[in-house]
Every structure is written in C-alpha cells, then in structure tokens.
Image: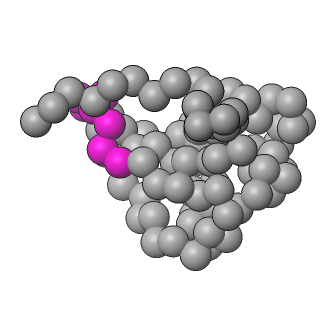
C-alpha cells in the first residue's frame, strides 16, 4: 500500500503537491487517525498535529500552511495499476 500526503490550495482547490509517505507504515497511519485498518482505504483530512507526526515519522519536512488543505491518501497497487486511478494531468 502506498501512502501519500496530498496538498491542495484552499482558495482554488488546486493540487499543490503529492508527497510519498509510505515509509510511515499503514499501522502508524491507522493509529494516528484513530481508524481501523479496513478504513484506511478512504482519504482522510489531516490536522496540523497529524501532519507534523507524519512529517517526523517519515523524516520529511512538510511544513503546515493554513492556506492549504492536507490529506492522507492510500493507494493499493496491483500489477502496475493503482487504485483509485490517478486522474490524467493536463499538459502544460
């Protein structure tokens, strides 16, 4: 299972970044969010404290910005495919 923190701009709802935090392990994520493992398939909005805990556990500096929304998004991987599928990004 891959775990990502996704960051969205609150004003525009645009995706700002995706940060791979798979190293925190699903068990830690469940404990942090207070959910059973079977509910880890859902996207969970993160508080500043939860983001700080994930950042420390992953060894990645993810500063909290109140103008952004942060989510923990799990993805199950199957033979090169990811569920849920990622939307196609428009070419710039």
- In the rendered view, does 31 fall on the left or right side of 54? right
User: Which residue is nearer to you in this view: 31 or 85?
Assistant: 85
Instruction: Identify which residue is drawn at 59% across, 42% down.
Output: 72
Q: Position of residue 63 (x, y in %)?
A: 42, 64
Write down the quadrant of residue 39 in the picture.
top right
- In the rendered view, does 14 fall on the left or right side of 78? left
Picture mark count: 0
Q: Position of residue 78 (x, y in %)?
A: 69, 33
Q: Is residue 63 visible?
A: yes
How does the figure colour the protein chain or chains? one colour
Q: Is residue 32 visible?
A: no
User: Which residue is nearer to you in this view: 34 or 15?
Assistant: 15
Q: Position of residue 8 (x, y in %)?
A: 36, 38
Q: Residue furthest left?
A: 92
Write down the quadrant of residue 75 in the picture.
top right
- In the rendered view, does 89 fall on the left or right side of 40? left
The N terminus lies in quadrant: top right
Q: Residue furthest front?
A: 79
Q: Give the extent of the magenta segment.
A: 11-17
Instruction: Identify which residue is drawn at 84% across, 53% down.
Output: 27
The C terminus lies in quadrant: top left
Q: Position of residue 10 (x, y in %)?
A: 32, 34
Q: Would residue 92 be counted in the magenta stretch?
A: no
- In the rendered view, does 79 fall on the left or right side of 85? right
Instruction: Identify which residue is drawn at 47% across, 54% down.
Output: 19
Instruction: Identify which residue is drawn at 72% across, 29% down.
Output: 41
Q: Is residue 91 above or below residue 16?
A: above
User: Which residue is nearer to you in this view: 5 or 67?
Assistant: 5
């Amino acid at each position: 299972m891959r775990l990502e923190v996704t960051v969205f701009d609150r004003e525009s709802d645009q995706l700002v970044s995706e940060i791979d935090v798979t190293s925190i392990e699903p068990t830690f994520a469940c404990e942090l969010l207070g959910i059973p493992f079977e509910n880890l398939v859902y996207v969970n909005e993160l508080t500043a404290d939860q983001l700080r805990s994930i950042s420390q556990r992953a060894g990645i500096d993810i500063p909290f910005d109140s103008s952004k929304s942060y989510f923990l998004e799990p993805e199950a991987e199957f033979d090169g495919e990811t569920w849920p599928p990622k939307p196609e990004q428009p070419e710039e």
